[in-house]
Amino acid sequence: MKTSSYTAIAYLFLAPALILMGVFTFWPVGYNAYLAFNDYSIADATATWNNFEHFKYLYGEDLFHQALKNSLLFLLVVPVIQVAALLVAKLVNNKLPGMTFFRAAFYIPVITAISIAGIVWLNVYKYDGILTWFLQSLGLIEEQVNWLGEPKIAIYMVMIFTFWKGIGYYMVLYLAGLQAIPTEVEEAAVLDGANAWQRFWKITVPMVKPTILLCTLLSTIAALKAFQEVVVLTRGQADTYTALYYVYAQAFTNFNFGRAAAAGLVVTFFCVLLAIVQFRFFGEKK
């Protein structure tokens, strides 16, 4: 069979996937960009061109600035959750009794419905909840604290919830990466006298670098898209608006789809920018 025939068959098999990506990925992104420069009326489904008015509004609005600041603040979760997930994966990768239980225990929050997890953590964070009782028992606080109602700390409480909900997911990815490392490499390092830290830093980390890139990219996008956590815990109260919650509020509370699209386009810009930076930082050097 000629090379051209192989190429045609390859494109034929790729075509369904490309069509689905075009319909469900590229077209929505393109239409969102179109709406960002229009006033859209849901009543008669008409769009009116308004140049950069939505972006000018966002530039001068304090609430959007706060939402964007909170979304960027969420990026603090990224390095913490990646280091913690890698260390946990390293621990549960040991062939010791009970490791299956610990793997399941860390993964349970991932498969727990966000609404159920929200109810649990609302009880943890309430005035007389577990967190207050625990800290008072240790003598770290004297009075009850409104963890989700105090603007200075509420966003950090939401970030802790995000960390708890996500660490198991990245642990599984790192576990797969660790189990792909040939045991002969570790054994050779042991014979050469390398200690545990040297084996971790010189062998484990470089060999799971592609997994680190994937997990960092996924967690960065997840941080910038933080939304469900805000809905179940605070609904945007106490200065906990995130950029995506702002998009939701503009679209489905204020019914200003053009402004919501413009805010969504700004979030997309930050996602793409940070993805490029991470590929350059973690990507293979030629």
Image (tube, helix red, strand yellow):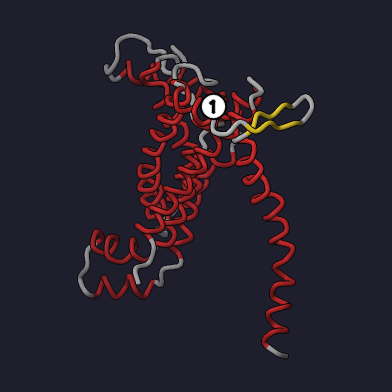
Q: Nearer the viewer, residue 246 or 109?
A: 246
Furthest-right residue in view? Answer: 44
Q: Is residue 93 above or below residue 133?
A: below
Q: State how many labels appear.
A: 1
Q: Which residue is drawn at 29% across and 60% down?
A: 200
Q: Nearer the viewer, residue 170 or 154?
A: 154
Furthest-left residue in view? Answer: 193
Lateral position of residue 113 relative to residue 275, left or right: right
Q: Residue at x 68, y 49 (%)?
A: 27
> Can the viewer see residue 141 in this picture?
yes
Quadrant of image for the N terminus: bottom right
Q: Where is residue 236 in the image (x, y as percent from the top left)?
A: 51, 21
Q: Disc 1 marks which residue?
A: 246
Furthest-bottom residue in view? Answer: 1
Lateral position of residue 18 relative to residue 100, left or right: right
Q: Which image quadrant is residue 245 in?
A: top right
Q: In this view, does 3 lie above or below 227?
A: below
Q: Where is residue 72 in the image (x, y as percent from the top left)?
A: 40, 35
Quadrant of image for the C terminus: bottom left
